[in-house]
Amino acid sequence: MAHADRLEITNNPARVAVTATGMVSPLGFGLAETLESLRSSRDCVTPVMRFSVTQCRCKTAGQVSDLRLLAGQAEIPRSKRLHRASHMMIQALQELVTQQAEFEPELTVIGTTSGGMSYGERYYRSLNGAGDLRHAPTWIANYPAQKPVIDAQTVFGISAPCQVIANACASGTNAIGHAFECVRSGRYKRVLAGGYDALAEMVFVGFDSLQASTPEKCRPFDRHRSGMVLGEGAAVLALENLDLARKRGAPVLAEIIGYGISTDNFHITQPEPSGIGAQQAMERALESADISAADVDYINAHGTATAFNDAAEGKAISALFNGVPVSSTKSMMGHSLGAAGAIEAVVCLLALQHQFLPANINFTTPDDGVDLNIVANEARRAVVNMVLSNSFGFGGTNASIVMRKFPPLPRLPRTGDT
Amino acid sequence: MSLAIAGMGWVTPLGTSIDSVWQRLLQGEEAPATTISEQFADRGYSVFRVPESALRGISHSRLRRASAISRFAAAAGLHALEYAGLKLESQRAERIALIFAVSNGGVTYTKRFYHEIVGSGAQAASPLLFPETVFNAPASHLAAILGVTGATYTLVGDGAVGLAAITMAEELMANETLDYCLVVGTEEIDWLLCDAYRRWRLLRMAPPIEPFSKQNRGMILSEGAGAILLARDGFVTIERAHPGGYFTRRTDAQKTLKGILHDLGQVEIDFAISSANGTFVDQAESQALQEVVSDALVYTGKPALGESVGAAGLWQIILAAQALRSKEIPPVLHANHGVPLRLSLSRTPIASARCAIVLSSGLNQQTAGLRLAIQ
């Protein structure tokens, strides 16, 4: 703390602290399990049993156990009616509230892509096949995208208004980025941010129909990559004005110091091949953080393992950064869409706290077209002071955030520094 | 910080020109209802649809395969820019943000896409349809048409999402690198939506929508889009956007709405644009308005235009801005004379009106409000 006490404290713009967080994903229930999975570079992708995938190319996904999810939530009123996305949000928020019971957000910003989609599927299947529609009102009531957010807030007595951002796969990072700007501008003191998404047949088949998902292992940035696998989960972060957080004695887990957003208008499902959209988002995040590319110690890439994304993102990273370690943790847990940016922000936070680089597993052969320093297959110890996390989505939405260890480490000279 | 409205555009079942739709509302017109049906069901539903002629002249390669929700949004957005006389050159493309408000999204293509999976299996799934099912597809199309390269957001919520998008625009415009924010609310109708709302006991099988009736006979769904171009200067100021809140039970909606009205009603309010649509919302809003701003004249456009959910909030703001400019409020259609509110039951002049509240209570627990003023 002695070092932090010497930091200059300014109010304009406000510094933004992360004072608590919680998550559930295929990597584990909570931070401790997630950390263990990341350190051991565990492959958490499993065969899909939730719906039939016999006609799909891809048959696997990163999945959250229903048994475990529901086991801890039996006491919640109407628990059985809630969508599993609500259960995931409740699980994640439970962990955050356990850390910071007194955190009272003035605003909640959450990203998602699918809401309670599987309830919509049940409703449609029952209508179309003359099935049992007795539960239709429950499915309909729990289908809207804001419902899991409201459910989770209600359980913990949080009354903040909710903004639900649906910017496709960039949603989670957009939610954190927007929440960051709301606190930084001084308009809000405390904002709850995050993302969630639960696996749904329609979305699974949709990516399969685009031939974006793979029947093999997910190999981001590998020359032999053949596509993504889907995932699911939820993560939430408590964002606070850093000065006020410290005044009330809240622990500061990390700082968010920059956010960049861009839109490339190339194609509704494909990024601009030169990576210009991704590059702009990263440049804007660095500018917002008032740092240079050389200050970044690790990039948690969007890294879906599709041919197009990884080529474009790889070019963008190569153009801006010189040999910074890069990994896509989607290789371990799949792509959780609207939750991905929030989950990966928590992964970055763990990397900052525990001074290691999470791995990009299933990596065998570098891609000739992309010059990246991949953290291949095994996590490794490293000095990590600043990290950048990318999320890119359908419709050309690109988002990047920059996080910093708190208190920051002294800047050490590196190769290439003069 | 206050923002101002620099441009407006809408696509409604009564037409697309701001002034001509306004004149029709002043004259007490109501959109014609049509019936939509579904191949696997006998029941049809009455809805207010956008006439096909409304989208003539809107063409772009990005809209070729796009669903109605995207085409409505593009038309409304382009009209708002035209209204403001704004041409987006490349330098400006980074200085404008785009925020979309949607509720049900591209439900027609979503249904069609899933129908193929259910009927013929995953191998029948269309890779052309899937991208159009994503919530941010309409925003992506408009961003591409306009060449926007900066911030683009899609907010999802219930009928209050349009006002929530204005709050978000205020938050974005705190950043001085932005000159404009184009906020678009959009929605399309499908039989499936009507059926879902009916099962939820919120839909009426045929018009009229009877606002503020104690019987809560239900709403009629409609479709279209509304767009507001926000700038630092304009003809009507958004003095305050309340971020709103949510209610866990319908009976609690009134309490949340009162909180919003107390916050917004700290100055003299001349009139309020309510979101009353023939459902439980009406009693909640009625009681909150009576208690907090009892002197304000009250108008709801939903009996005339229908409940357009994602587009509704933007339509309400346009109605408020038009009323402030034209110094008149249209008649509330199909309202009972015994309603304990100062309802605008006929075309009402409001010569000295300066300040208005727009109040929105959604059907899925969300609420929001804002205050507009004209100098």
Image (cartoon, coloured by chain):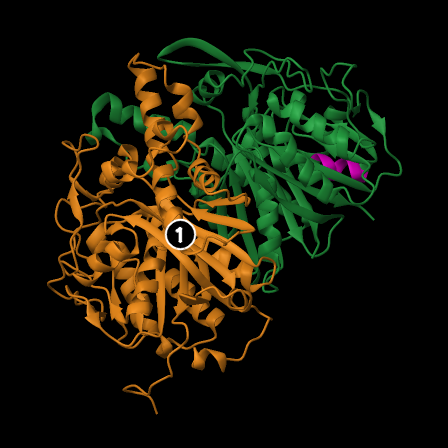
- As drawn, the residue found furthest toward the bottom would be A418
The chain ID associated with circle 1 is A
Up the image or down, A382 lies above or below B295; here it is: below
Residues rendered magenta in the picture? B319-325
Give how far across and how far down residue B177 sits, in percent.
58, 64
What chain is colored orange? A
Name the residue at 60% across, 71% down.
A12
Q: For the N terminus of chain A, give its image quadrant.
A: bottom left
Give how far across and how far down residue B159 sits, in percent.
56, 33
Callout 1 amino acid? Thr
Residue B162 can be seen, yes or no: yes
Name the residue at 44% across, 43% down.
B136
Up the image or down, B255 lies above or below B334; here it is: below
**Residue B371 sits in quarter:** top right
What chain is colored green? B
Residue occupied by mark 1: A98
Q: For the C terminus of chain A, give its image quadrant.
A: bottom left
